[in-house]
Image: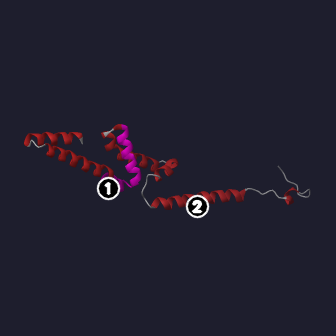
Amino acid sequence: MLTATLFTVLTTLTTTTSTSDLVWIVVIFYSIHIVDVNFLMPGIVASRLRINALISILGVVIGVALTGIPGLFLSIPAIAFVKILCDEIEGLNPWGIIPGDDISYTKKIQAIYEVEKNIFTSKQKSKKKITRENLSPGNSQKD
């Protein structure tokens, strides 16, 4: 961004002597940059990668705060990489759902919940309940 602005300002200096032209160039460049980084990048690129818009905006802001311009360009691919990694590793699936923007994840979560619930209830049913009848002197239990 800085390089593009610098080349444009230098080109404008060679063609005109008006400082208002230089100011307008800088204002237009940075306003386009702000709209691109904060709205277009998260909206278009993140929707293609199935990343939540809020997560992508936060990622861009954190990337710029940590590393500047390289963080600006690398934040969305880094979030996509982490999301894909979490989606593919069995134990990290819930962490892949958080930045996701896919409705099918809701069905996956419900299916996982039902499986866990069925496993828990089957374990509860398989445990032998100790009752007074089982512990009466007439019944002999072998340990």
Magenta residues (range): 40-66
Q: As drawn, which residue projects farthest toward the right? A: 137
> Label 2 belongs to which residue?
114
On screen, 35 above or below 74? Answer: below
Q: Nearer the viewer, residue 82 or 43?
A: 43
Residue at x-position 87% and y-position 56%: 135
As measured in the structure, the alpha-carbon distance from the residue carrying label 2 to the one carrying label 1 is 35 Å
Decide whether the magenta segment is chiefly helix, strand or loop. helix
Q: Amino acid at mark 2?
A: Glu
Report x, y in % for residue 49.
36, 53
Report x, y in % for residue 64.
35, 41
> Label 1 belongs to which residue?
44
Q: Residues within 10 Å of mark 1 (few under 14, many from 20)?
A: few
Local SS, label 2: helix
The answer to whether residue 2 of the structure is visible from this angle is: yes
Q: Amino acid at mark 1?
A: Ile
Residue at x-position 34% and y-position 52%: 42
- Residue 125 - label: none
Report x, y in % for residue 109.
52, 58
Q: Is residue 93 magenta?
A: no
